[in-house]
């Protein structure tokens, strides 16, 4: 059996040296490097990655969520939020991921104190809408977000539809739709 490959992206060592007391994990898959950060350290590490002259990840390309419910391998938490960072001057892409474990049942819309992260909208203003999407679809809330409200579903939607424990056919939402035709416009 082959030995695991040690991640060798230079940003890993820079972050490790800058935060000696913090716990990090690192992975590489198909040439893409991912730094796994503890939720409490996310904002500080992201600000470092944006502002340090050795890294200068000046573009946040994407923010997304993942639900690892029933995943075959044991993940570090049920939910993950990932950030896709780009340094234009080096043509370098780098991912940061945070894992979260719910402390309450996830079959509804209950606000779970374990599913909170600090918003990065003060570092990258373009994070506003992707963070809203992660909130709407997965129920992960972002502290200090300037306008955290649903973006893809209506405000009173009864759940977070990309959670894997959400029924594929919904919970009766379709039957409650008001039919709108051309005469209503």
Image: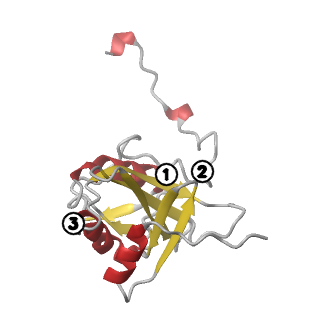
Mark 1, residue position: 160
Viewer-side label of 2, 3: 3
Q: Which mark is residue 51?
A: 3
Quadrant housing residue 14: bottom left
The structure residue drawn at horizontal position 48% and vertical position 55%, both measured from the top left corner, is: 65
The structure residue drawn at horizontal position 47% and vertical position 57%, both measured from the top left corner, is: 109
- The reply to whether dot 2 and dot 1 touch (C-beta < 8 Å) is yes
The structure residue drawn at horizontal position 69% and vertical position 66%, both measured from the top left corner, is: 73
Q: Which mark is residue 166?
A: 2
Quadrant housing residue 53: bottom left
Q: Position of residue 52 (x, y in %)?
A: 23, 69
Q: Secondary structure at mark 2?
A: loop
**Which callout, 2 or 1, points at the residue further toward the start of the chain?**
1
Viewer-side label of 3, 1: 3
Q: Is residue 106 visible?
A: no
In this picture, residue 125 sits left or right of residue 164? left
Q: Secondary structure at mark 1?
A: loop
Looking at this rendering, what residue extends furthest in the top direction? 183
Q: For the image shown, how many numbered marks are present on the structure?
A: 3
């Amino acid at each position: 059996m082959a030995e695991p490959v040690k991640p060798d992206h230079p940003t890993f060592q820079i972050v490790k040296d800058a935060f000696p007391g913090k716990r990090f994990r690192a992975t590489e898959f198909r040439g893409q490097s991912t730094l796994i950060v503890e939720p409490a350290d996310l904002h500080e590490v992201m600000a470092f990655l944006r502002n340090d002259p050795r890294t200068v990840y000046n573009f946040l390309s994407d923010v997304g969520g993942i639900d690892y419910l029933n995943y075959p391998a044991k993940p570090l938490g049920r939910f993950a939020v990932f950030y896709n960072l780009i340094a234009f001057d080096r043509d370098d892409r780098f991912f940061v991921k945070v894992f979260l474990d719910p402390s309450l049942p996830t079959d509804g819309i209950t606000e779970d104190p374990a599913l909170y992260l600090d918003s990065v909208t003060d570092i990258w203003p373009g994070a506003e809408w992707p963070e809203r999407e992660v909130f709407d679809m997965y129920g992960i809330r972002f502290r200090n977000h300037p306008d955290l409200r649903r973006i893809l579903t209506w405000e009173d939607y009864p759940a977070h539809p990309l959670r894997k424990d959400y029924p594929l056919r919904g919970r009766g939402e379709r039957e409650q739709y008001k039919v709108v035709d051309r005469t209503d416009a």
